[in-house]
Image (cartoon, grey):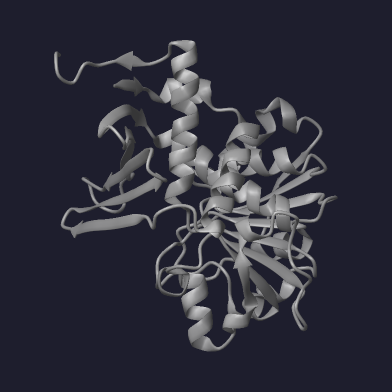
């Protein structure tokens, strides 16, 4: 079995490859070509901690088992500790191929999915990107969106913690591909009213921007707060939106942005137009009375499988990682 460290993962991932694999994962999901994933969520309250598990497969060959573990050993006011590991299996032989440190892997995989969705739904000449949230997912979200929309020349960052959002702005300005791009810290209202593409990567329980301020034709990627009782978009936005999903199964129960808007009547089932992978040529024409596109991303296990398989194949070619004999020691 090959063990890939965080440094190995960073050296093996290329942004265009990750986006291409995310789009392929969406296509396979929409085609019904992959088994239904298995999700697990184990939590405790004292001290607060949790473990999220996701198991998925690509047909009979490759199986991925990922566990994300977090803890607050010093209380909720102290920093959260978290780690992630992914095991890629040769399912035909019941043999583990690789154990992958998955902190950076998760950020790339998630951002690649956002970018693949925005690439289909967003304006081709988009100039302004607004990102809500300044946590671990935000930097890669910015980087990947710029990769699919080189026309972006203004990045508006919104966050609840001034120090964190200022640090994020400094990080984005430091990247060579953002030379000449205006990077600003913004209010939630100004960003909503200005952006051509909006991406949300928060843990908020309540909406993070005013939906009535969003310009017609905007693409909104709702990528955070993936819990039944949490939402990032308000009813005003959902009334205006044609919705695209990474997967229909479970969205109305597990995604608060969908579940709560359905419960309030702001969203009707007909607005959920399709799974994103069913529209490789772009979105369907906006339905009557709708003027924005929303991509609700919950994350798919098949994204993990395809990206992990790709990284392991690259590692094998380059001789990266540590080889462990699980039988002989």
Query: Measured along the vertical axis of the image, is residue 55 above or below residue 258?
Result: above
Q: Identify whether 315 is placed above or below 38.
A: above
Which residue: 80% across, 56% down? 123
Quadrant housing residue 229: bottom left
Quadrant that contains the C terminus: top left
Check the image and name the residue furthest to the bottom.
265
Residue toward you, 158 or 138? 138
Foreground: 218 or 119? 119
Q: Nearer the viewer, residue 164 or 213?
A: 213
Instruction: Name the outermost residue toward the top.
Output: 319
The residue shown at (42%, 49%) is: 301
Taking 15 as reference, is 28 above or below it? below
Q: Position of residue 293 (x, y in %)?
A: 70, 67
Of 212 and 301, which appears nearest the observer? 301
**Figure quadrant of the N terminus:** top left
Looking at the picture, how far across and down is residue 172, in whole percent? 65, 35
**Residue at horizontal 50 percent and vertical 30 percent from the top:** 310
Task: Answer left or right for 24 relative to 88.
Answer: right
Residue pictured at 57% horizontal, 40% vertical: 21
Q: How many marks?
A: 0
Q: Is residue 206 visible?
A: no
Residue 78 in percent (x, y) is at 30, 46
Residue 308, given in percent of the width and then of the height, sits at 44, 34
User: Would residue 321 be seen by someone viewing this image from the given angle?
Assistant: yes
């Amino acid at each position: 079995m090959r063990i890939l460290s965080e440094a190995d993962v960073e050296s093996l991932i290329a942004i265009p490859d990750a986006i291409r694999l995310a789009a392929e994962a969406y296509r396979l999901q929409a085609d019904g070509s992959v088994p239904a994933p298995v999700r697990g969520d184990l939590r405790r309250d004292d001290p607060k901690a949790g473990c999220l598990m996701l198991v998925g497969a690509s047909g009979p060959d490759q199986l991925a088992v990922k566990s994300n573990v977090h803890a607050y050993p010093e209380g909720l006011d102290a920093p959260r500790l978290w780690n992630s590991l992914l095991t890629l299996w040769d399912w035909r032989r019941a043999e583990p191929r690789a154990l992958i440190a998955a902190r950076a892997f998760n950020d790339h995989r998630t951002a690649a999915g956002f970018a693949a969705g925005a690439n289909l739904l967003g304006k081709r000449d988009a100039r302004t990107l607004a990102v809500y949230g300044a946590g671990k997912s935000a930097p890669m979200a910015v980087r990947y969106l710029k990769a699919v929309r080189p026309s972006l020349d203004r990045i508006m960052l919104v966050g609840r913690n001034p120090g964190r959002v200022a640090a994020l702005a400094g990080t984005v300005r430091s990247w060579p591909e953002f030379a000449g791009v205006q990077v600003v810290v913004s209010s939630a209202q100004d960003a909503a009213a200005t952006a051509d593409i909006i991406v949300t990567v928060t843990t908020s329980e309540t909406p993070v921007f005013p939906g009535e301020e969003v310009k017609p034709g905007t693409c909104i990627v709702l990528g955070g707060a993936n819990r039944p009782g949490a939402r990032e978009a308000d009813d005003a936005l959902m009334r205006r939106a044609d919705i695209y999903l990474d997967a229909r199964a479970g969205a109305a129960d597990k995604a608060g942005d969908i579940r709560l808007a359905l419960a309030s009547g702001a969203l009707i089932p007909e607005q959920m137009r399709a799974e994103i992978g069913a529209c490789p040529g772009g979105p369907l024409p906006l339905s009557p009375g709708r003027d924005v596109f929303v991509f609700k991303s919950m994350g798919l296990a098949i994204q993990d499988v395809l990206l992990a398989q790709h990284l392991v194949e690259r590692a094998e070619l380059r001789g990266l990682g540590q080889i462990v004999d699980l039988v002989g020691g």
